[in-house]
Image: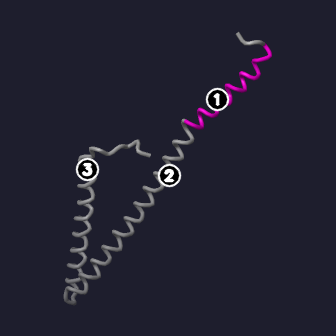
Amino acid sequence: MADFQEIPQLTKDLVDMSKEYLRQETIEPAKKLGKAAGMGVGGAALFSLGAFLALLGVYALMKMVLPDGEWYVVLARVITAVVAVAGAGLVAWRMSGDEQGVEVDDF
């Protein structure tokens, strides 16, 4: 059993070990998770901007290729919408695929 004089030192050691354990098991993994989430959000934002600009280019191309006229502008918009839906469907199809070999705990 510990002496009466050793109790303050043991208490200090217990508090220090508890702080180190909490830092090691909560703060460090949270920092890693925050970094991964930030990269994911940044990548999603850039991907969305690229998709928007690509669709804008498709619309401009359709307006140049199709003859002038009110209904051809509507047709260009419809073609652009179909391309957008096809692209979204392709992304959704690839996301719902079998995810074998992907480790969640890689970071």
User: Where residue 21 sits: x, y (%)?
Assistant: 59, 32
Pointer 1 local density, CA inside 10 Å: few below 14, some 14–19, many at least 20: few
Residue under label 3 = 96
Residue 107 or 59: which is nearer the viewer? 107
Q: Is residue 9 left or right of residue 51?
A: right
Q: Which callout, 1 or 2, points to the residue nearer the camera? A: 1
Residue to which mark 2 is pinned: 35
- Residue linked to disc 1: 17
Q: Residues within 10 Å of mark 2 (few under 14, many from 20)?
A: few
Whole-percent x, y for residue 9 in the image: 75, 23
Is residue 52 rendered to the left or right of residue 64?
right
Q: Which residues are magenta?
A: 4-24
Q: Secondary structure at mark 2?
A: helix
Q: Does label 3 or label 1 sit earlier along the sequence?
A: 1
Q: Name the N-terminal-most of marks 3 and 2.
A: 2
Q: Residue furthest top?
A: 1
Which of the two discs, 3 and 2, sits closer to the camera?
A: 2
The amino acid on which the numbered mark 3 sits, given as a three-letter code, is Ser
Q: Quadrant of the N terminus?
A: top right
Q: Residue at x 72, y 23 (%)?
A: 11
